[in-house]
């Protein structure tokens, strides 16, 4: 089930959990709610769906952890975000602040084909 396409919202939850993990903190519902500015019930709903898809493990009233599939998915989201930020900033000349904000908005909607074409164009420009 982990290969089902995730909604933007679920990808945002994975990013938040991964970000909390990377800071060395334990991901808890309260932390995720704070990072995303959402309610705790919204976090619980998203976590149930991410668990169903095999991307997180969440013990009631406990920590939230990404599974290996969840870690892979979060890494891919981060890769897309970083690629798009660099593309907008370095290739198109968009300001760093706008590039970061716009990359966050569009990373969830572009197809894998488009992402790979952007990566190839950036690589060809470097040569």
Image (cartoon, rainbow, N blue to C red):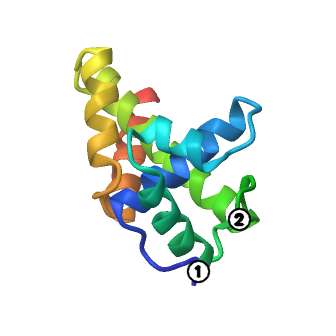
Q: Is residue 120 left or right of residue 65?
A: left
The part of the image, by quadrant, that contains residue 64 is bottom right
Question: Which element carries disc 2, helix, strand or loop?
Answer: loop
Q: Quadrant of residue 54?
A: bottom right
Which quadrant would the N terminus be assigned to in this image? bottom right
Query: Foreground: 27 or 110?
Result: 27
Q: Residue furthest bottom?
A: 1
- Nearer to the camera, 31 or 1: 31
Residue at image x 34%, y 46%?
118
Q: Nearer the viewer, mark 1 or mark 2?
A: 2
Query: Residue 21: x, y in percent?
Result: 70, 40
Question: Which residue position is annotated with label 1?
Answer: 52
x 77%, y 32%: residue: 24
- 10 Å crowding of disc 1: few (<14), some (14-19), many (20+): few
Residue ID at (29%, 30%): 101
- Residue 98: mark: none
Q: Residue at x 22, y 20 (%)?
A: 94
Judge whether 50 appears above or below 126 on screen. below
**Figure check: 33 above or below 62:** above
Residue denoted by label 2: 60
How far from the left and from the top, in percent, is residue 8? 34, 58
Q: Could you tell me which secondary element the residue under label 1 belongs to? A: helix
Q: Nearer the viewer, residue 60 or 36?
A: 60
Q: Residues within 10 Å of mark 2 (few under 14, many from 20)?
A: few
Percent from the top left, x then y, of residue 18? 63, 45
């Amino acid at each position: 089930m982990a290969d089902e396409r995730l909604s933007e919202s679920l990808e945002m939850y994975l990013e938040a959990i991964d970000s909390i993990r990377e800071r060395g903190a334990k991901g808890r519902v309260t932390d995720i709610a704070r990072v995303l500015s959402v309610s705790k019930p919204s976090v619980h709903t998203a976590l149930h769906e991410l668990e169903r898809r095999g991307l997180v493990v969440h013990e009631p009233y406990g920590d939230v952890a990404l599974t290996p599939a969840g870690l892979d998915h979060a890494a891919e989201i981060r890769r897309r975000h970083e690629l798009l930020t660099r593309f907008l900033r370095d290739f198109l000349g968009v300001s760093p602040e706008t590039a970061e904000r716009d990359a966050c908005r569009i990373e969830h909607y572009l197809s894998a084909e488009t992402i790979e074409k952007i990566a190839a164009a950036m690589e060809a420009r470097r040569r």
